[in-house]
Image (cartoon, rainbow, N blue to C red):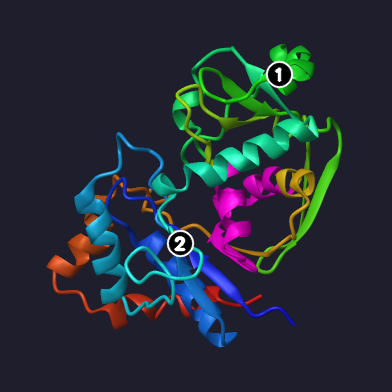
Amino acid sequence: MTPYRGRIAPSPTGYLHLGHARTFWIASQRARSAGGALVFRNEDLDRPRCKPEFAAAMYEDLRWLGLDWQEGPDVGGPFAPYSQSERYKNYLEVWRNLRDAGVIYPCACSRKDLERALAAPHEDDDELPYPGTCRTKLPEAAGWESPAGISWRFKVPDREVIRFNDLHFGAQQFTAGKDFSDFLVWRRDDIPAYQLAVVADDQAMRITEVVRGADLLKSTARQLLLIRALGYGVPEYFHCPLMRDETGARLAKRHDALSLRALRAQGVHPEKLVEGFAEVNKP
Protein backbone atom coordinates (compact mmCIF):
# COMPACT_ATOMS: atom_id res chain seq x y z
CA MET A 1 0.00 0.00 0.00
CA THR A 2 1.10 3.55 -0.70
CA PRO A 3 2.16 5.30 2.53
CA TYR A 4 -0.23 8.02 3.65
CA ARG A 5 0.80 11.56 2.78
CA GLY A 6 -1.42 14.46 3.77
CA ARG A 7 -0.88 18.19 3.61
CA ILE A 8 -1.82 21.52 5.10
CA ALA A 9 -1.65 24.44 2.69
CA PRO A 10 -2.22 27.87 4.24
CA SER A 11 -1.77 31.17 2.40
CA PRO A 12 0.05 34.05 4.17
CA THR A 13 -2.55 36.65 3.21
CA GLY A 14 -3.84 37.18 6.76
CA TYR A 15 -3.93 35.55 10.18
CA LEU A 16 -5.37 32.04 10.34
CA HIS A 17 -8.80 31.78 11.94
CA LEU A 18 -10.68 29.03 13.76
CA GLY A 19 -11.93 27.49 10.52
CA HIS A 20 -8.37 27.08 9.29
CA ALA A 21 -7.37 25.71 12.68
CA ARG A 22 -10.01 23.00 12.62
CA THR A 23 -9.26 21.93 9.04
CA PHE A 24 -5.51 21.81 9.62
CA TRP A 25 -5.94 20.01 12.94
CA ILE A 26 -8.08 17.37 11.24
CA ALA A 27 -5.46 16.97 8.50
CA SER A 28 -2.80 16.52 11.15
CA GLN A 29 -4.84 13.94 13.07
CA ARG A 30 -5.66 11.95 9.95
CA ALA A 31 -1.99 11.80 9.00
CA ARG A 32 -1.05 10.75 12.53
CA SER A 33 -3.78 8.08 12.70
CA ALA A 34 -2.61 6.64 9.39
CA GLY A 35 1.02 6.59 10.53
CA GLY A 36 1.87 8.82 7.59
CA ALA A 37 3.56 12.11 6.79
CA LEU A 38 2.11 15.60 6.92
CA VAL A 39 3.43 18.17 4.44
CA PHE A 40 3.27 21.92 5.09
CA ARG A 41 2.91 23.84 1.82
CA ASN A 42 3.12 27.62 1.80
CA GLU A 43 0.66 28.77 -0.88
CA ASP A 44 2.15 32.22 -1.41
CA LEU A 45 1.45 32.83 -5.09
CA ASP A 46 -0.63 35.94 -4.41
CA ARG A 47 2.46 38.12 -4.01
CA PRO A 48 0.80 41.51 -3.37
CA ARG A 49 -1.29 40.11 -0.49
CA CYS A 50 1.27 37.74 1.03
CA LYS A 51 3.15 39.34 3.93
CA PRO A 52 6.18 38.09 5.89
CA GLU A 53 4.40 38.67 9.20
CA PHE A 54 1.51 36.45 8.11
CA ALA A 55 3.93 33.73 6.98
CA ALA A 56 5.73 33.80 10.34
CA ALA A 57 2.39 33.68 12.14
CA MET A 58 1.29 30.58 10.21
CA TYR A 59 4.13 28.50 11.61
CA GLU A 60 3.94 29.95 15.12
CA ASP A 61 0.17 29.67 15.50
CA LEU A 62 -0.09 26.13 14.15
CA ARG A 63 2.79 24.95 16.34
CA TRP A 64 1.00 26.57 19.29
CA LEU A 65 -2.13 24.61 18.36
CA GLY A 66 -0.10 21.42 18.66
CA LEU A 67 0.47 20.59 15.00
CA ASP A 68 3.71 19.25 13.65
CA TRP A 69 4.73 18.34 10.13
CA GLN A 70 7.48 16.24 8.67
CA GLU A 71 8.11 18.32 5.54
CA GLY A 72 7.79 22.02 4.81
CA PRO A 73 9.58 25.30 4.14
CA ASP A 74 10.87 25.45 7.72
CA VAL A 75 12.01 21.82 7.99
CA GLY A 76 12.89 20.83 4.43
CA GLY A 77 12.14 17.50 2.81
CA PRO A 78 12.62 15.43 -0.34
CA PHE A 79 10.15 17.41 -2.46
CA ALA A 80 11.37 20.94 -1.75
CA PRO A 81 10.81 23.77 -2.32
CA TYR A 82 7.59 23.83 -0.29
CA SER A 83 6.66 27.45 -1.04
CA GLN A 84 4.69 27.94 -4.23
CA SER A 85 6.50 31.17 -5.08
CA GLU A 86 9.62 29.03 -5.62
CA ARG A 87 7.98 26.40 -7.84
CA TYR A 88 7.46 28.34 -11.09
CA LYS A 89 9.45 25.85 -13.19
CA ASN A 90 7.24 23.01 -11.98
CA TYR A 91 4.08 24.89 -12.96
CA LEU A 92 5.50 25.84 -16.34
CA GLU A 93 6.15 22.17 -17.10
CA VAL A 94 2.55 21.33 -16.22
CA TRP A 95 1.30 24.17 -18.44
CA ARG A 96 3.32 22.73 -21.33
CA ASN A 97 1.86 19.28 -20.74
CA LEU A 98 -1.67 20.70 -20.82
CA ARG A 99 -0.84 22.68 -23.96
CA ASP A 100 0.49 19.56 -25.65
CA ALA A 101 -2.59 17.61 -24.58
CA GLY A 102 -4.76 20.19 -26.38
CA VAL A 103 -6.98 20.97 -23.40
CA ILE A 104 -6.13 24.63 -22.68
CA TYR A 105 -6.41 27.77 -24.77
CA PRO A 106 -5.34 31.44 -24.59
CA CYS A 107 -8.08 33.79 -23.45
CA ALA A 108 -8.15 37.56 -23.95
CA CYS A 109 -11.55 38.15 -22.32
CA SER A 110 -12.54 40.25 -19.31
CA ARG A 111 -10.17 40.59 -16.37
CA LYS A 112 -12.99 40.63 -13.80
CA ASP A 113 -12.29 37.14 -12.52
CA LEU A 114 -8.52 37.18 -12.93
CA GLU A 115 -7.90 38.80 -9.57
CA ARG A 116 -9.42 35.78 -7.90
CA ALA A 117 -7.57 33.16 -9.93
CA LEU A 118 -4.72 32.85 -7.42
CA ALA A 119 -6.89 31.99 -4.46
CA ALA A 120 -9.06 28.99 -3.73
CA PRO A 121 -12.51 29.82 -5.18
CA HIS A 122 -14.65 29.68 -2.04
CA GLU A 123 -18.42 29.32 -1.98
CA ASP A 124 -19.18 33.05 -2.01
CA ASP A 125 -16.58 34.15 -4.56
CA ASP A 126 -16.36 31.31 -7.05
CA GLU A 127 -15.03 31.96 -10.55
CA LEU A 128 -17.48 33.89 -12.66
CA PRO A 129 -19.23 31.83 -15.38
CA TYR A 130 -17.30 31.98 -18.63
CA PRO A 131 -19.25 31.87 -21.92
CA GLY A 132 -16.44 30.21 -23.90
CA THR A 133 -15.79 33.18 -26.16
CA CYS A 134 -12.16 32.28 -26.80
CA ARG A 135 -12.65 28.52 -27.21
CA THR A 136 -12.04 28.97 -30.92
CA LYS A 137 -8.40 29.69 -30.02
CA LEU A 138 -7.81 26.13 -28.84
CA PRO A 139 -5.87 25.16 -32.01
CA GLU A 140 -3.61 28.20 -31.51
CA ALA A 141 -2.35 26.97 -28.14
CA ALA A 142 0.25 24.68 -29.70
CA GLY A 143 2.10 27.69 -31.11
CA TRP A 144 2.72 29.32 -27.73
CA GLU A 145 6.13 28.71 -26.16
CA SER A 146 5.25 30.55 -22.96
CA PRO A 147 1.96 31.28 -21.15
CA ALA A 148 3.00 34.86 -20.36
CA GLY A 149 1.01 37.83 -21.58
CA ILE A 150 -2.45 36.27 -21.79
CA SER A 151 -4.83 34.26 -19.64
CA TRP A 152 -5.23 30.51 -20.15
CA ARG A 153 -8.33 28.42 -19.61
CA PHE A 154 -9.06 24.71 -19.41
CA LYS A 155 -11.74 23.58 -21.85
CA VAL A 156 -14.20 21.55 -19.81
CA PRO A 157 -16.10 18.67 -21.43
CA ASP A 158 -19.60 20.16 -21.52
CA ARG A 159 -22.33 18.11 -19.85
CA GLU A 160 -19.90 15.52 -18.52
CA VAL A 161 -20.77 14.55 -14.94
CA ILE A 162 -17.73 14.42 -12.66
CA ARG A 163 -18.27 12.08 -9.73
CA PHE A 164 -16.14 11.39 -6.69
CA ASN A 165 -16.54 10.10 -3.17
CA ASP A 166 -15.77 12.46 -0.34
CA LEU A 167 -14.66 10.74 2.85
CA HIS A 168 -16.82 13.06 4.95
CA PHE A 169 -19.77 14.10 2.75
CA GLY A 170 -20.06 10.94 0.64
CA ALA A 171 -20.94 10.78 -3.06
CA GLN A 172 -20.53 14.04 -4.98
CA GLN A 173 -21.22 15.03 -8.57
CA PHE A 174 -20.88 18.18 -10.65
CA THR A 175 -21.74 18.77 -14.29
CA ALA A 176 -19.08 20.48 -16.41
CA GLY A 177 -20.46 23.44 -18.31
CA LYS A 178 -23.36 23.75 -15.86
CA ASP A 179 -21.90 23.84 -12.35
CA PHE A 180 -18.68 25.41 -13.60
CA SER A 181 -17.32 26.59 -16.93
CA ASP A 182 -13.90 26.81 -18.58
CA PHE A 183 -11.69 27.76 -15.67
CA LEU A 184 -8.45 29.68 -15.39
CA VAL A 185 -5.16 27.83 -15.12
CA TRP A 186 -2.77 30.73 -15.78
CA ARG A 187 -2.94 34.50 -15.36
CA ARG A 188 -1.87 37.01 -17.97
CA ASP A 189 0.74 38.36 -15.51
CA ASP A 190 2.52 34.99 -15.82
CA ILE A 191 1.41 33.44 -12.54
CA PRO A 192 -0.30 30.03 -12.39
CA ALA A 193 -3.85 30.02 -11.03
CA TYR A 194 -4.95 28.09 -7.96
CA GLN A 195 -6.32 25.01 -9.75
CA LEU A 196 -3.15 24.28 -11.71
CA ALA A 197 -0.78 25.00 -8.83
CA VAL A 198 -2.62 22.74 -6.38
CA VAL A 199 -2.84 19.80 -8.79
CA ALA A 200 0.83 20.17 -9.74
CA ASP A 201 1.99 20.34 -6.12
CA ASP A 202 -0.17 17.50 -4.83
CA GLN A 203 1.25 15.29 -7.57
CA ALA A 204 4.86 16.40 -7.09
CA MET A 205 4.65 16.00 -3.30
CA ARG A 206 2.90 12.62 -3.63
CA ILE A 207 -0.13 13.60 -1.60
CA THR A 208 -2.50 10.66 -1.08
CA GLU A 209 -5.30 12.49 0.75
CA VAL A 210 -6.43 16.10 0.47
CA VAL A 211 -8.12 17.55 3.56
CA ARG A 212 -9.70 20.98 3.08
CA GLY A 213 -12.91 22.98 3.55
CA ALA A 214 -16.27 22.12 2.03
CA ASP A 215 -16.20 25.34 0.00
CA LEU A 216 -13.72 23.58 -2.28
CA LEU A 217 -15.92 20.62 -3.25
CA LYS A 218 -16.55 22.13 -6.68
CA SER A 219 -12.83 22.77 -7.10
CA THR A 220 -12.28 19.05 -6.67
CA ALA A 221 -14.36 18.43 -9.80
CA ARG A 222 -12.24 20.92 -11.73
CA GLN A 223 -9.04 19.42 -10.42
CA LEU A 224 -10.13 15.90 -11.33
CA LEU A 225 -10.36 17.06 -14.94
CA LEU A 226 -6.82 18.43 -14.76
CA ILE A 227 -5.59 15.25 -13.10
CA ARG A 228 -7.12 13.14 -15.86
CA ALA A 229 -5.66 15.31 -18.61
CA LEU A 230 -2.21 15.07 -17.04
CA GLY A 231 -2.40 11.34 -16.34
CA TYR A 232 -1.87 11.76 -12.59
CA GLY A 233 -2.98 9.47 -9.81
CA VAL A 234 -6.12 10.59 -7.96
CA PRO A 235 -5.81 11.30 -4.23
CA GLU A 236 -8.64 10.76 -1.78
CA TYR A 237 -10.59 13.76 -0.52
CA PHE A 238 -11.93 14.73 2.89
CA HIS A 239 -13.81 18.03 2.98
CA CYS A 240 -14.54 19.59 6.35
CA PRO A 241 -17.78 21.45 7.14
CA LEU A 242 -17.29 25.20 7.24
CA MET A 243 -17.22 27.18 10.46
CA ARG A 244 -19.53 30.19 10.43
CA ASP A 245 -20.05 33.33 12.49
CA GLU A 246 -23.23 34.31 14.31
CA THR A 247 -24.75 35.65 11.06
CA GLY A 248 -24.16 32.41 9.19
CA ALA A 249 -21.30 33.74 7.06
CA ARG A 250 -18.28 31.48 6.72
CA LEU A 251 -15.26 32.54 8.67
CA ALA A 252 -12.70 34.54 6.71
CA LYS A 253 -9.43 36.25 7.50
CA ARG A 254 -11.31 39.47 8.09
CA HIS A 255 -12.66 37.90 11.31
CA ASP A 256 -9.71 39.21 13.32
CA ALA A 257 -11.33 38.46 16.69
CA LEU A 258 -11.42 34.76 15.79
CA SER A 259 -7.88 34.59 14.47
CA LEU A 260 -5.47 32.26 16.23
CA ARG A 261 -3.21 35.23 16.81
CA ALA A 262 -5.96 37.12 18.66
CA LEU A 263 -7.03 34.08 20.66
CA ARG A 264 -3.46 33.46 21.73
CA ALA A 265 -3.17 37.06 22.88
CA GLN A 266 -6.34 36.58 24.95
CA GLY A 267 -4.75 33.67 26.78
CA VAL A 268 -6.96 30.97 25.26
CA HIS A 269 -5.51 27.48 25.72
CA PRO A 270 -5.12 25.42 22.53
CA GLU A 271 -6.57 22.35 24.26
CA LYS A 272 -9.82 24.27 24.65
CA LEU A 273 -9.98 25.03 20.94
CA VAL A 274 -9.47 21.46 19.75
CA GLU A 275 -12.12 19.95 22.04
CA GLY A 276 -14.79 20.51 19.45
CA PHE A 277 -12.71 19.55 16.43
CA ALA A 278 -12.68 15.78 16.88
CA GLU A 279 -16.32 15.21 15.91
CA VAL A 280 -15.70 16.36 12.35
CA ASN A 281 -12.83 13.91 11.88
CA LYS A 282 -15.14 11.02 11.04
CA PRO A 283 -16.35 9.56 7.76
- Closer to the camera, 117 or 283? 117
* Residue neighbourhood size for the residue with mark 2, other residues' Cα within 10 Å, grouped as few (<14), some (14–19), many (≥20): some
Spatial distance from mark 1 to mark 2, Cα to Cα? 32 Å
Residues drawn in magenta? 195-224
In contact (CB < 8 Å): disc 1 and disc 2: no
Left or right relative to 258: residue 10? right
Q: Which residue is mark 1?
A: 143
What kind of element bears circle 1? Answer: helix
Q: Is residue 249 visible?
A: no
Q: Which residue is mark 2?
A: 80
- Marks counted in the figure total 2
Place of residue 85 in the rendered image (x, y in percent of width and height, measured from the top left): 40, 45
What kind of element bears circle 2? Answer: loop
Q: Amino acid at mark 1?
A: Gly
Left or right relative to 148: residue 95? right
Q: Is residue 214 magenta?
A: yes
227 vs 186: above or below:
below
